[in-house]
Image: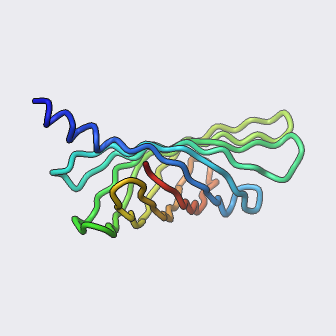
Amino acid sequence: MVAFAGVLEAQIKPGLHVARATDTFEGVNGVGASVQVGLPVLPLKLFVAGEYFFPGCDGCSFWGGSADLHVSLPIPIVSPYVAAGLVLRNTSLSDTVVRTGGLGFGAGVNLNTLVVGGYVEGRYEFMDGGDDQLVIRLGIRF
C-alpha cells in the first residue's frame, strides 16, 4: 500500500509557465502556475492552470484559468499530447469587467526528465461572446 501511494504522489507535478495570448489586447504576455495529475498506467492526465497577463494599458487586467485532459503517447522522454478542456477568462478595461467561459483545444510536447521537466503547448480557446484566441505556453514542471 505504501509503495502504491508513492507512485501516486510522484505523478502530481506542479509547474510554472510563461504564456502569450495572441488576440486579447492585440497580444499580451503573462505568467502562470499549474499542476498536472496522472496515473502512470494511463495515458490521461488532468492539467489545471491559472495565468495573469500584463496588458499595456492603464486600468486594464486580464487573467484566467483552465482545466484540461491531456492524452499523450507513451514515449519515455519526449511525449506529444492533445488537450481539451474548459477555460475561464476575466478581462477588465477601466470600469468594465467581462467574465467569459469556453472550450480550449490544443496540442503540445512534454519533456520528461527525472527532476525537472518542460513543456510547450499551443491551444485555441473558443470563448462565449466570440473573443476566441490562440494561447501559447512554455513551462517547467517539478
| Image position, residue 54 (x, y; %) | 75, 49
Q: Quadrant of the N terminus?
A: top left
Is 131 on the left-hand or right-hand side of 66?
right
In which image quadrant can residue 62 be found?
Answer: top right
**Residue located 28% across and 43% down the image:** 10
Q: Quadrant of residue 138?
A: bottom right
Residue 123, x across and y down, in percent: 50, 61
At 64% from the left and 54% from the top, the residue drawn is 131
Left or right of 134: which side holds 22? right
Please name the residue shown 20% across and 41% down the image: 7
Q: Nearer the viewer, residue 41 or 87?
A: 41
Picture mark count: 0
The residue most toward the top is 1
In front of the other: 42 or 88 = 42
55 relative position to 32: left or right? right
**Looking at the picture, how far across and down is residue 87, in whole percent?**
51, 45
User: Given the current orientation, which residue lies at the most extreme left position?
Assistant: 1
Q: Nearer the viewer, residue 128 or 26?
A: 26
Residue that extends furthest to the right in the rendered view of this protein: 58
Identify the coloring: rainbow
Q: Residue at x 33, y 56 (%)?
A: 114
Q: Position of residue 132 (x, y in %)?
A: 60, 57
Q: Is residue 38 left or right of residue 36?
A: left
